[in-house]
Amino acid sequence: MLAKYANKMGLLTNHRILVTGILTDESLAYGIAQRALEEGATIAVSGAGRGTSITRRTVRKLGDVGEIIELDVTDPAQVAEAVTEVEERFGRLDGLVHAIGFAPQTCLGSGMFTAPFEDVATAMHISTYSLAALVGAFRPLLQKSEALGGASVISLDFDGSRAYPMYDWMGVMKAGLESLGRYLSREVGVDMIRINMLAAGPIRTMAAKSIPGFQLFEDTWADRAPLGWDVNDRSSVSDAAIALLSPLLRGTTASVIHVDGGAHAMG
């Protein structure tokens, strides 16, 4: 059955996918959207707040993907409006890429005792809770997926099992994201919706540049990774995302898939 499916034009032929988190063409979300289109998917792209105009300009490079959907994950009304718009466009959803994360500057690079709770709460709301908000809101459309094996949700992650220098509260958010993915998978598996975390190694993106001391990751990651690592090459991350969105990994859920050259497993 899968061989017959794979013989079609692409791994994601007839898939309807929503991609969040695109800002510049260096972003991981942009690379995933680009590969999804190459594999035959039809995609919608969301933007948030003042960054929407930047997203709009960036997405033009992908071709015709329709008007940007405004989606501020902290605004329940806007989330509901986004669901309505996606339903009008697609009628269903076969894939959702959660590439959303933000932490106030006090949460990064200053240790764990500097950020006030209000800043930590902001980071939690946008970087972690947003996954539950989107899966819950889009669940009726994900339930309608026509893809072999059902719908796939992937959330971009950074290894939450260790404490990394300078990453501070965002590391806590990623650990929470991984736990949340498992709990959500338990709840929506009955609907044939699978949820996986894609834990990428450090890639030189705009988001990465906002992390104090990111140069430290660049300087040491390749030495720790058995396969080596290129901070300028996001292709392995994009390809892994396509595999997760496709029926190839339809039996995989509640998992953290590491695409980091193996560095996470080294001492």
Image (spheres, grey):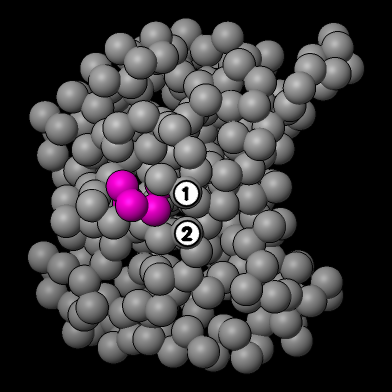
Mark nearest the camera among 2 and 1 is 1
Front one among 17 and 54: 54
Kind of residue at badge 2: Asp
- Residue under circle 1? 61
Residue at 61 percent of width and 68 percent of height: 201
Left or right relative to 134: residue 76: left
The three-letter amino acid code for the residue at tag 1 is: Lys
In the image, is residue 122 part of the stretch drawn in magenta? no
Mark sitting on residue 25: 2
- Left or right? Give the position of 21 relative to 110: right
SS assignment at label 2: loop
Name the side, left or right, on which 49 lies relative to 242.
Answer: left
Q: Which image quarter: residue 35?
A: top right
Marks 2 and 1, how far apart at CA: 8 Å
Task: Residue 125: give x, y in percent of width and height.
Answer: 23, 51
Q: Earlier in the sequence, mark 2 or mark 1?
A: 2
Q: Position of residue 9 (x, y in %)?
A: 76, 22
Q: How busy is the neighbourhood of tag 1: few (under 14 within 10 Å), some, or many (20 plus)?
A: few
- 10 Å neighbourhood of mark 2: few (<14), some, or many (≥20)? some
Q: Which residues are magenta?
A: 55-59
